[in-house]
Amino acid sequence: MIAWADGPEHAEMIAGRFYPEENVVRVTRRPRDLWVISKGQLGIDGKSRPDDVARDCLNRASGDKLHAIRLYMLDTGADLKEAQRVIEANMSMGW
């Protein structure tokens, strides 16, 4: 995630410079501050697919991570740790 770019073209240029081996899949603007989340710390192996329930919770929460975690817990019955992991993993994949 790139938070210091002036626009989508600038973000793609920065990504290409710092991550030349990665392809830019999607560029979107987020309404909130961005945080860099390590995929390794979240247990994402690169083969993970976005979770539809988590994406829906993020959408209903307008990207507010804490609210999305609460919604995920209500919708699925997951505990706080699992809900946080799933929501953060989906945020890192771009909800």
Image: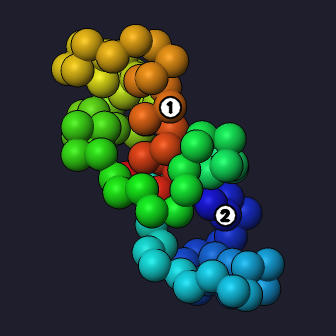
Residue 21 percent across, percent down from the top left:
69, 86
Residue 78 percent across, percent down from the top left:
33, 16
Q: Residue at x 50, y 31 (%)?
A: 85
Colour theme: rainbow
Q: Check disc 1 and report the residue beneath it.
A: 85
Label 2 is placed on what type of residue? Ile
**Any part of residue 71 in sight:** no
Label 1 is placed on what type of residue? Arg
Horizontally, residue 65 falls left or right of residue 16, namely left
Of residue 94 and residue 44, the one placed in the foreground of this image is 44
Q: Which circle, 2 or 1, is nearer the viewer?
A: 1
Q: Residue at x 73, y 87 (%)?
A: 20
Q: Quadrant of residue 3?
A: bottom right
Of residue 69 and residue 4, the one placed in the foreground of this image is 69
Q: Check disc 2 and report the residue beneath it.
A: 2
Q: Residue at x 58, y 43 (%)?
A: 43
Q: Earlier in the sequence, mark 2 or mark 1?
A: 2
Q: Residue furthest right?
A: 18
**Any part of residue 53 in sight:** yes
Labelled disc at residue 95: none
Q: Are marks 2 and 1 in contact (CB under 8 Å)?
A: no
**Mark 2 surroundings: few (<14), some (14-19) or many (≥20) residues within 10 A:** some
Horizontally, residue 28 falls left or right of residue 73, namely right
Q: Secondary structure at mark 2?
A: loop
Q: Secondary structure at mark 1?
A: helix
Q: Quadrant of residue 82?
A: top left
Q: Residue at x 60, y 40 (%)?
A: 42
Residue 46 percent across, percent down from the top left:
52, 62
